[in-house]
Image (cartoon, coloured by chain):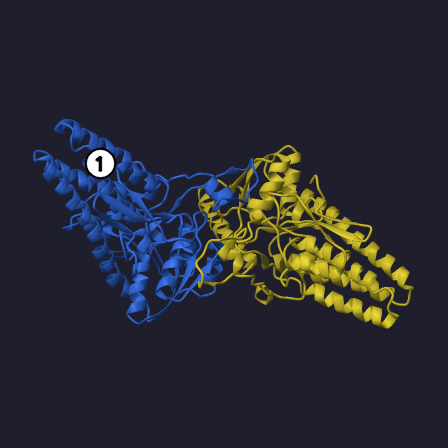
Chain colours: A yellow, B blue
Amino acid sequence: MQYRTIKFNHGVLKLIDQRKLPLELRYYEARNYKEVESAIASMVIRGAPAIGAAAAYGVYLAAFEYRDLPRETFLAKVLEADTELAKARPTAVNLSWAIKKMERVLDNNQNETIDTILTALLNEADKIAEQDIETNMAMARYGNEIVPEKAAILTHCNAGALATVDYGTALGVIRKAHYSGKKITVYADETRPRLQGARLTAFELVEEGIPATLIADSAAATLLRDGKIDLVLVGADRIAANGDTANKIGTYMLSEIASKYRIPFYIVAPTSTIDFNISSGEEIAIEERSPEEITKIQGVRIAPEGINVYNPAFDVTPAENITGIITEKGIIHPPLAAGINSLKNEKGVMKN
Amino acid sequence: MQYRTIKFNHGVLKLIDQRKLPLELRYYEARNYKEVESAIASMVIRGAPAIGAAAAYGVYLAAFEYRDLPRETFLAKVLEADTELAKARPTAVNLSWAIKKMERVLDNNQNETIDTILTALLNEADKIAEQDIETNMAMARYGNEIVPEKAAILTHCNAGALATVDYGTALGVIRKAHYSGKKITVYADETRPRLQGARLTAFELVEEGIPATLIADSAAATLLRDGKIDLVLVGADRIAANGDTANKIGTYMLSEIASKYRIPFYIVAPTSTIDFNISSGEEIAIEERSPEEITKIQGVRIAPEGINVYNPAFDVTPAENITGIITEKGIIHPPLAAGINSLKNEKGVMKN
């Protein structure tokens, strides 16, 4: 994208404030880990890979904040901050994945000078951010192999540059297919309640001139049934060892209709999104968010006072509805459990 | 309901302005047929039965407007107004059903004095409105037979008092079940893009103290899969002779998931919603509405300029996904085509 979602310079983490898009392109500046935590919880920054990278810088900012404390206190305080950061949102496993990576660096350097520790932590956070872009590029290359020369692609939520450090996961594949000369048109679900499709995916697609049509989430089923969609590409927030995948609420419904009409349905996600510790989607904690996301839109009240609300942020798509998982290591084909299991032992894949 | 959706007094058609609910309870006053047409097209009034009753008064208002013209011109102008009214919205067949009823009265009285014609037309419109309430009561009685003593009921859009002259179709059954002492809880889909669930169904349920929870449309699929829903009740805008049913966009998707998990899925609609002239859902014209319904919410822009929009107002649920159609004549069970066919010859059912 023209803008990078996450930047770190001179002690300041700059995040594109996604609550204000597409009306305003503004940066949110976090100068300490509490501000990073708050940016993640309030969805200034969202998207599993972006949350991971932002949290890594959060760990560094905590270390920087506590640099003058005695070593033991310093180490204890940083770990305390890590725990807080890890709780900012419950579903995206990339958050704990990135924090664990940072903790490993802390652990390996615990006897070094605080200055050395700080440098090592900053390097690791930079590496996580840079690698996210490389990972997205690799997924885009693998993903492009399964995109037909001419395709109408349905996507849900925002799995774009704005959900990552740059380039995107599902939208990364779409970018790659478009720039490689394929005739791509995109249908973007608006994605209630937070409207990431209408606000963020539509923004990215319009910016880049990729032909795109915005629809209400409810309109996708008919398009799938009527043969208007050739391929579904979505991101993921957590993938269980058996391939069950948590993603934005609404994904499961798409997967059922796509499966019924045998339309290829792919998850595009880095291996850092795989939680090798859980055997199935039943173990994934689903975040429930504020009722106001449903009763108000952009601050305008739409529902009457006194109505109850149930607002889960994610749902779980069962492995059997997934045609494949496009990762930076290649495409995992069914049976997904076997493919995920063999990834476990591969170099460069950290077990969450 | 405490308020009646449609009232006609002293030459003025008073309609609860549904664009302003739930924030404001205001009446829209139509004093001529053009204002009725505009109220239907702009969705001041919506819901298939309510549209039918409003249009009937529209025909009377046209006749009243042209009462001083020579008889031939008078008759021609009223028929012209009828044609315009019938075009206000394309999918709900109750609109043309009500207009045809009014035209029959006009036809039967064409040699009477204009005053007699006017009286006959007003009586017919009043009868359509009164019968709508009776019809809803009858559907509620039949429908209540299939509602368990304790049930979580999912509904989509607004098929309530606000979609009819009073009491409602799907929500009429829910009212009846609630007041008959059954333990009913309702899950209401918010129903993008026009948010009839969040604005209107939630309003009716809160007003009457029926336990209800509002959800994003995308959350329904998981509730259905996880056994949280015992019954789905929705209205209809047009039912084909084979039972295929056009209803608010999103209904089809619910029917697929309900069907997969064998959850009873009922249409609640008067026989005036059946279009005996069309053999299947493929022949139903699906209204496409303004892109602004998607790009703006309550006047607030949410999507970037330059994005294309596809905004169908309805979708078609295939007969095989429907457990039954609850009408004022009883419940039509599968095979729906046979049940609908036998209705054709029943007294009091007008063939559209």
Q: Secondary structure at mark 1?
A: helix
Could you say where residue A128 lies in the image, as x and y percent from the top left?
77, 53
Q: Residue at x 84, y 72 (%)?
A: A73
Could you say where residue B7 lies in the image, as x and y percent from the top left?
25, 50
For mark 1, name the chain: B
Can residue B28 be seen from the camera position used here? yes
Left/right of residue A62 with respect to residue B304 in the rendered view:
right
Q: Residues within 10 Å of mark 1 (few under 14, many from 20)?
A: many
Q: Is residue A78 above or below residue A178?
A: below
Front position in the image: B149 or A230: B149
| Figure quadrant of the C terminus of chain B | top left
Question: What residue does disc 1 label?
Answer: B62
Q: Residue at x 27, y 50 (%)?
A: B6
Q: Amino acid at mark 1?
A: Ala
Left/right of residue B224 with respect to residue A352 in the rendered view:
left
Front position in the image: B339 or B299: B299
Q: Residue furthest right?
A: A113
